[in-house]
Image: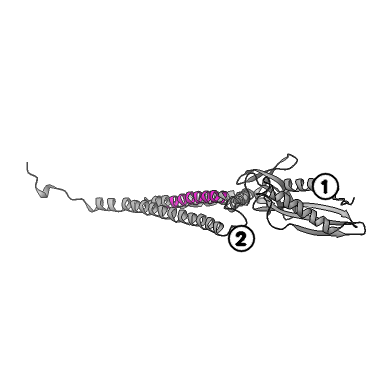
Amino acid sequence: MLVRLTDVKTPTPDVVAALTGAPLTVLIIIVVASLTTVIVRFLISRTVRGLIATEAKGLRLAPEKFGVAPNPRRKQRLETLRTVLVSTTTALIGSVAVLMILTTLGVNVAPLIASAGVVGIAVAFGAQALVKDVITGGFMLIEDQYGVGDRVELGTGGGILASGVVEEVGLRVTLIRDDDGRRWYVRNGEILRVANLTQGWAYAVVELRVARTTDLTLVRTTLSELTTQMRNEDLYADVVSHLEPECLIQEVTADLVALTWRVRVSADHDLSIASELRHRIAVAFAERGIELAP
């Protein structure tokens, strides 16, 4: 059976318009959104990898200048930031693409946008404190201000909120265990300043009060010998700094001289080193006849 060319029906203009109109536009939107997502992910990942490499290279080249070794937790924070940024941008691009597709298909999205705006304003007014806590917590995690196990002092403009060891860091609250065993729940939005006693180095501080007639040169020599002795021991070799300790005269009266001996040590060892120094100082002073003031 032969079919004549005149019997073959050509697509009508309506069919061509239907196939090349909205469906083609929807396809283009999907393709563009997908390519944009891939490009944004690549740029974010490349930027984060560059930050990690730059920081590690700088710390390797000048460890004495920075005073601390490369922090692996910093890399983890940057990786977390990368994940959050990728997820956020993907959701944003996807939302815009969905709205454009709905508009292309003839759906009126104006009521949806208006409703979302009203809901957003209501939520923003009702959850200002929550939003503030979450945003502040996010920046704390990104900047690596402190982490689990760090000894910190958290404060506001008017005083100290809590001090102790960090047990948990969340987007809304930080959990602190103080030296009395109490657990503090501190809202991140209330934290205005952070003193971290664990990062880098700290001072082991010993305060002394000796009699006014005491030979201060002998006192300083004794303290220096005890510090050097600790530094040369295997137990403290990696803890006590090679830098010269500081001897500060705080007060001089008719009866006594108050002084402070400060030794730079590795972070989170200041209390233990100070305690050991006090023990050795008490023994050495007794042996050398150095009299402590009441």
| Residue at the right extreme, as displayed | 254
The quadrant the N terminus occupies is top left
- Given this view, does label 1 or label 2 mark the residue nearer the observer? 1
Circles 1 and 2: CB atoms closer than 8 Å: no
Mark 1, Cα crowd under 10 Å, few <14 / some 14-19 / many 20+, is: few
Relative placement, left or right, of 8 versus 60 is: left
Q: Which residue position is annotated with label 1?
A: 282
Q: CA distance from mark 1 to mark 2?
A: 36 Å
The main secondary structure of the magenta stretch is: helix
| Residue at the top extreme, as displayed | 181
> x, y (%) of residue 138?
58, 50
- The residue type indicated by label 1 comes to Ala
Q: Secondary structure at mark 2?
A: helix
Total label count?
A: 2
> x, y (%) of residue 193?
68, 54
> x, y (%) of residue 281?
80, 49
Q: Quadrant of residue 177?
A: top right
Mark 2, Cα crowd under 10 Å, few <14 / some 14-19 / many 20+, is: few
For the point 58% across and 51% down, the residue is 71
Tell me if I can see residue 195 in this picture. no
Q: Which circle's residue, 1 or 2, is located before the other in the chain?
A: 2
Q: Secondary structure at mark 1?
A: helix
Q: Looking at the picture, tell me which residue is in the foreground, 123 or 82.
A: 82
Tell me the magenta residue range: 73-96
Q: Which residue position is annotated with label 2?
A: 65
Relative placement, left or right, of 84 versus 147 is: left
Q: Is 161 placed above or below 247 here?
A: above
For the point 48% across and 48% down, the residue is 87
Taking the magenta stretch, the answer to whether it contains residue 145 is no
> x, y (%) of residue 278?
79, 47
Q: Looking at the picture, tell me which residue is in the foreground, 20 or 236.
A: 236
